[in-house]
Amino acid sequence: MSEPTSDPLYVPALPARPSALVAYGLLAPELRAVVAPLWTVPPRVGHERTPGCPSRPLDPDPGALGDHVRLALARIARVQRDRPAWVDTRHVEREPGFPGLGTVRPPLRPVTGIERAAGAQVACAEAARAGGTGLGIRVRPDGGRSAEALGRLLERIAFARCPLDLLLDLGAVDEDQGADLTALQALNVLAPLHPWRTVVLLAGAFPRTRPEAYGSPLAETCRADRLLPGLLRHPGGGPGPRPVHGDYGAHDAASADRVSDTGDDPFRGALRYTADQAFLIGEVPAESGHHLRVRALAREIVASPHYRGAEYSEGDRWLRVCADGGGLPDTGHPDLWIRAGHNQHLTHVARELRRHS
């Protein structure tokens, strides 16, 4: 099956974990057709990783690390069903036991970045050339230094002669009042450096820390990223492709840098709902035995004026069933809650982008 040539409308950067993979797989077919994820293989062990920095300590079990990567890639390939997506292995590709970028097979597109070792960049370009699907370059904008580093990278991988995608990673913008200016500056400086196939602008708004009101029945936190789709629709008429909207789903920008969503994550026990201008977040204590609390929070979300009805998405349907107390043997666990949150979020953002496209 040949790779679709049309650009996606939406690129969510998601961890290659079952919760996010299933959430994407449950999207309606017409939405899957316009959504192309950027999957990041999370680390297998240890604490949260800083992108671009060597893992410390290294994974103590190279065999298990290899199995971890192969399983993640197999799950991505299964859920993508011959549709293209980007795969970033930045947390595992420098570990003993990494099976190599040749395991990122078409139509999946490997990803490298300006902060990575020259050898890793070249290996990624070789894999992209062999696969024939192109290469994603993920960049955290940093003024002129980003432009210089990107220029060196482009020279280093020119031998591959393959389509390149620019993935501009703004990270968390929930407290950044100047995120729109940062985005425009990055586009103006980096986009002209190459005739990119696709330019993606990633920005996250789900909070990294608990809001002051957290602990009340439902807390609200502002979605600063909602301003960026309007910016993307009016990019100033410059050269190159119109940038594509991206975010991190219903989670903070560092979700894929952690081993799981149920370890150090401050929102491991939370129901979440993406409204037009805010996230609704309901706290569930980490200990077990709080099914009544979960149902009460689901009822609050369903009774909220922001709720869009059980037919809107699989995540909305789950919230309604949980609130009503029928059809579910119990209220699930954190992985199920984040899955419902991701699915509802992806559905809403993709629908809004389709409506404005």
Image: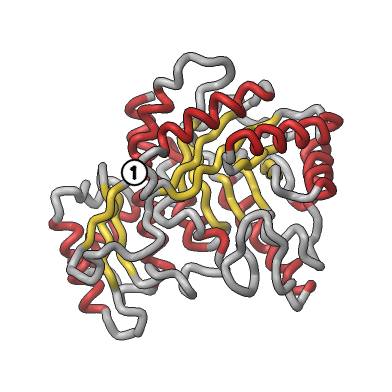
Up-down relation of residue 224 to residue 65 (above or below):
above
What residue sits 50% from the left and 60% below the top?
255
- Depth check: give the residue in front, 104 or 31: 104
Total numbered circles: 1
Where is residue 108 shown, x and y percent of the image?
Answer: 67, 43
**Quadrant in which the C terminus appears:** top left
Where is residue 162 shown, x and y percent of the image?
Answer: 77, 29
What residue sits 33% from the left and 55% below the top?
315
Q: Quadrant of residue 347?
A: top left
The answer to whether 140 appears left or right of 281 in the picture is: right
The answer to whether 213 appears left or right of 354 in the picture is: left
Up-down relation of residue 333 to residue 220 (above or below):
below
Residue 67 visible to an observer of this rendering = yes
Q: Quadrant of residue 146?
A: top right
- Depth check: give the residue in front, 298 or 79: 298
Where is residue 217 shown, x and y percent of the image?
Answer: 18, 68
Residue 316 visible to an observer of this rendering = no
Q: Secondary structure at mark 1?
A: helix
- Depth check: give the residue in front, 10 or 222: 222
Q: Amino acid at mark 1?
A: Ala
The answer to whether 119 appears left or right of 44 in the picture is: right
**Quadrant in which the N terminus appears:** top right
Where is residue 196 shown, x and y percent of the image?
Answer: 65, 25
For the rendered model, the colour scheme is secondary structure
Label 1 packing within 10 angstroms: few (<14), some (14-19), many (20+): many
Q: Quadrant of residue 179?
A: top left
What residue sits 42% from the left and 36% below the top?
30
Disc 1: which residue? 224
What residue sits 40% from the left and 43% below the top?
28
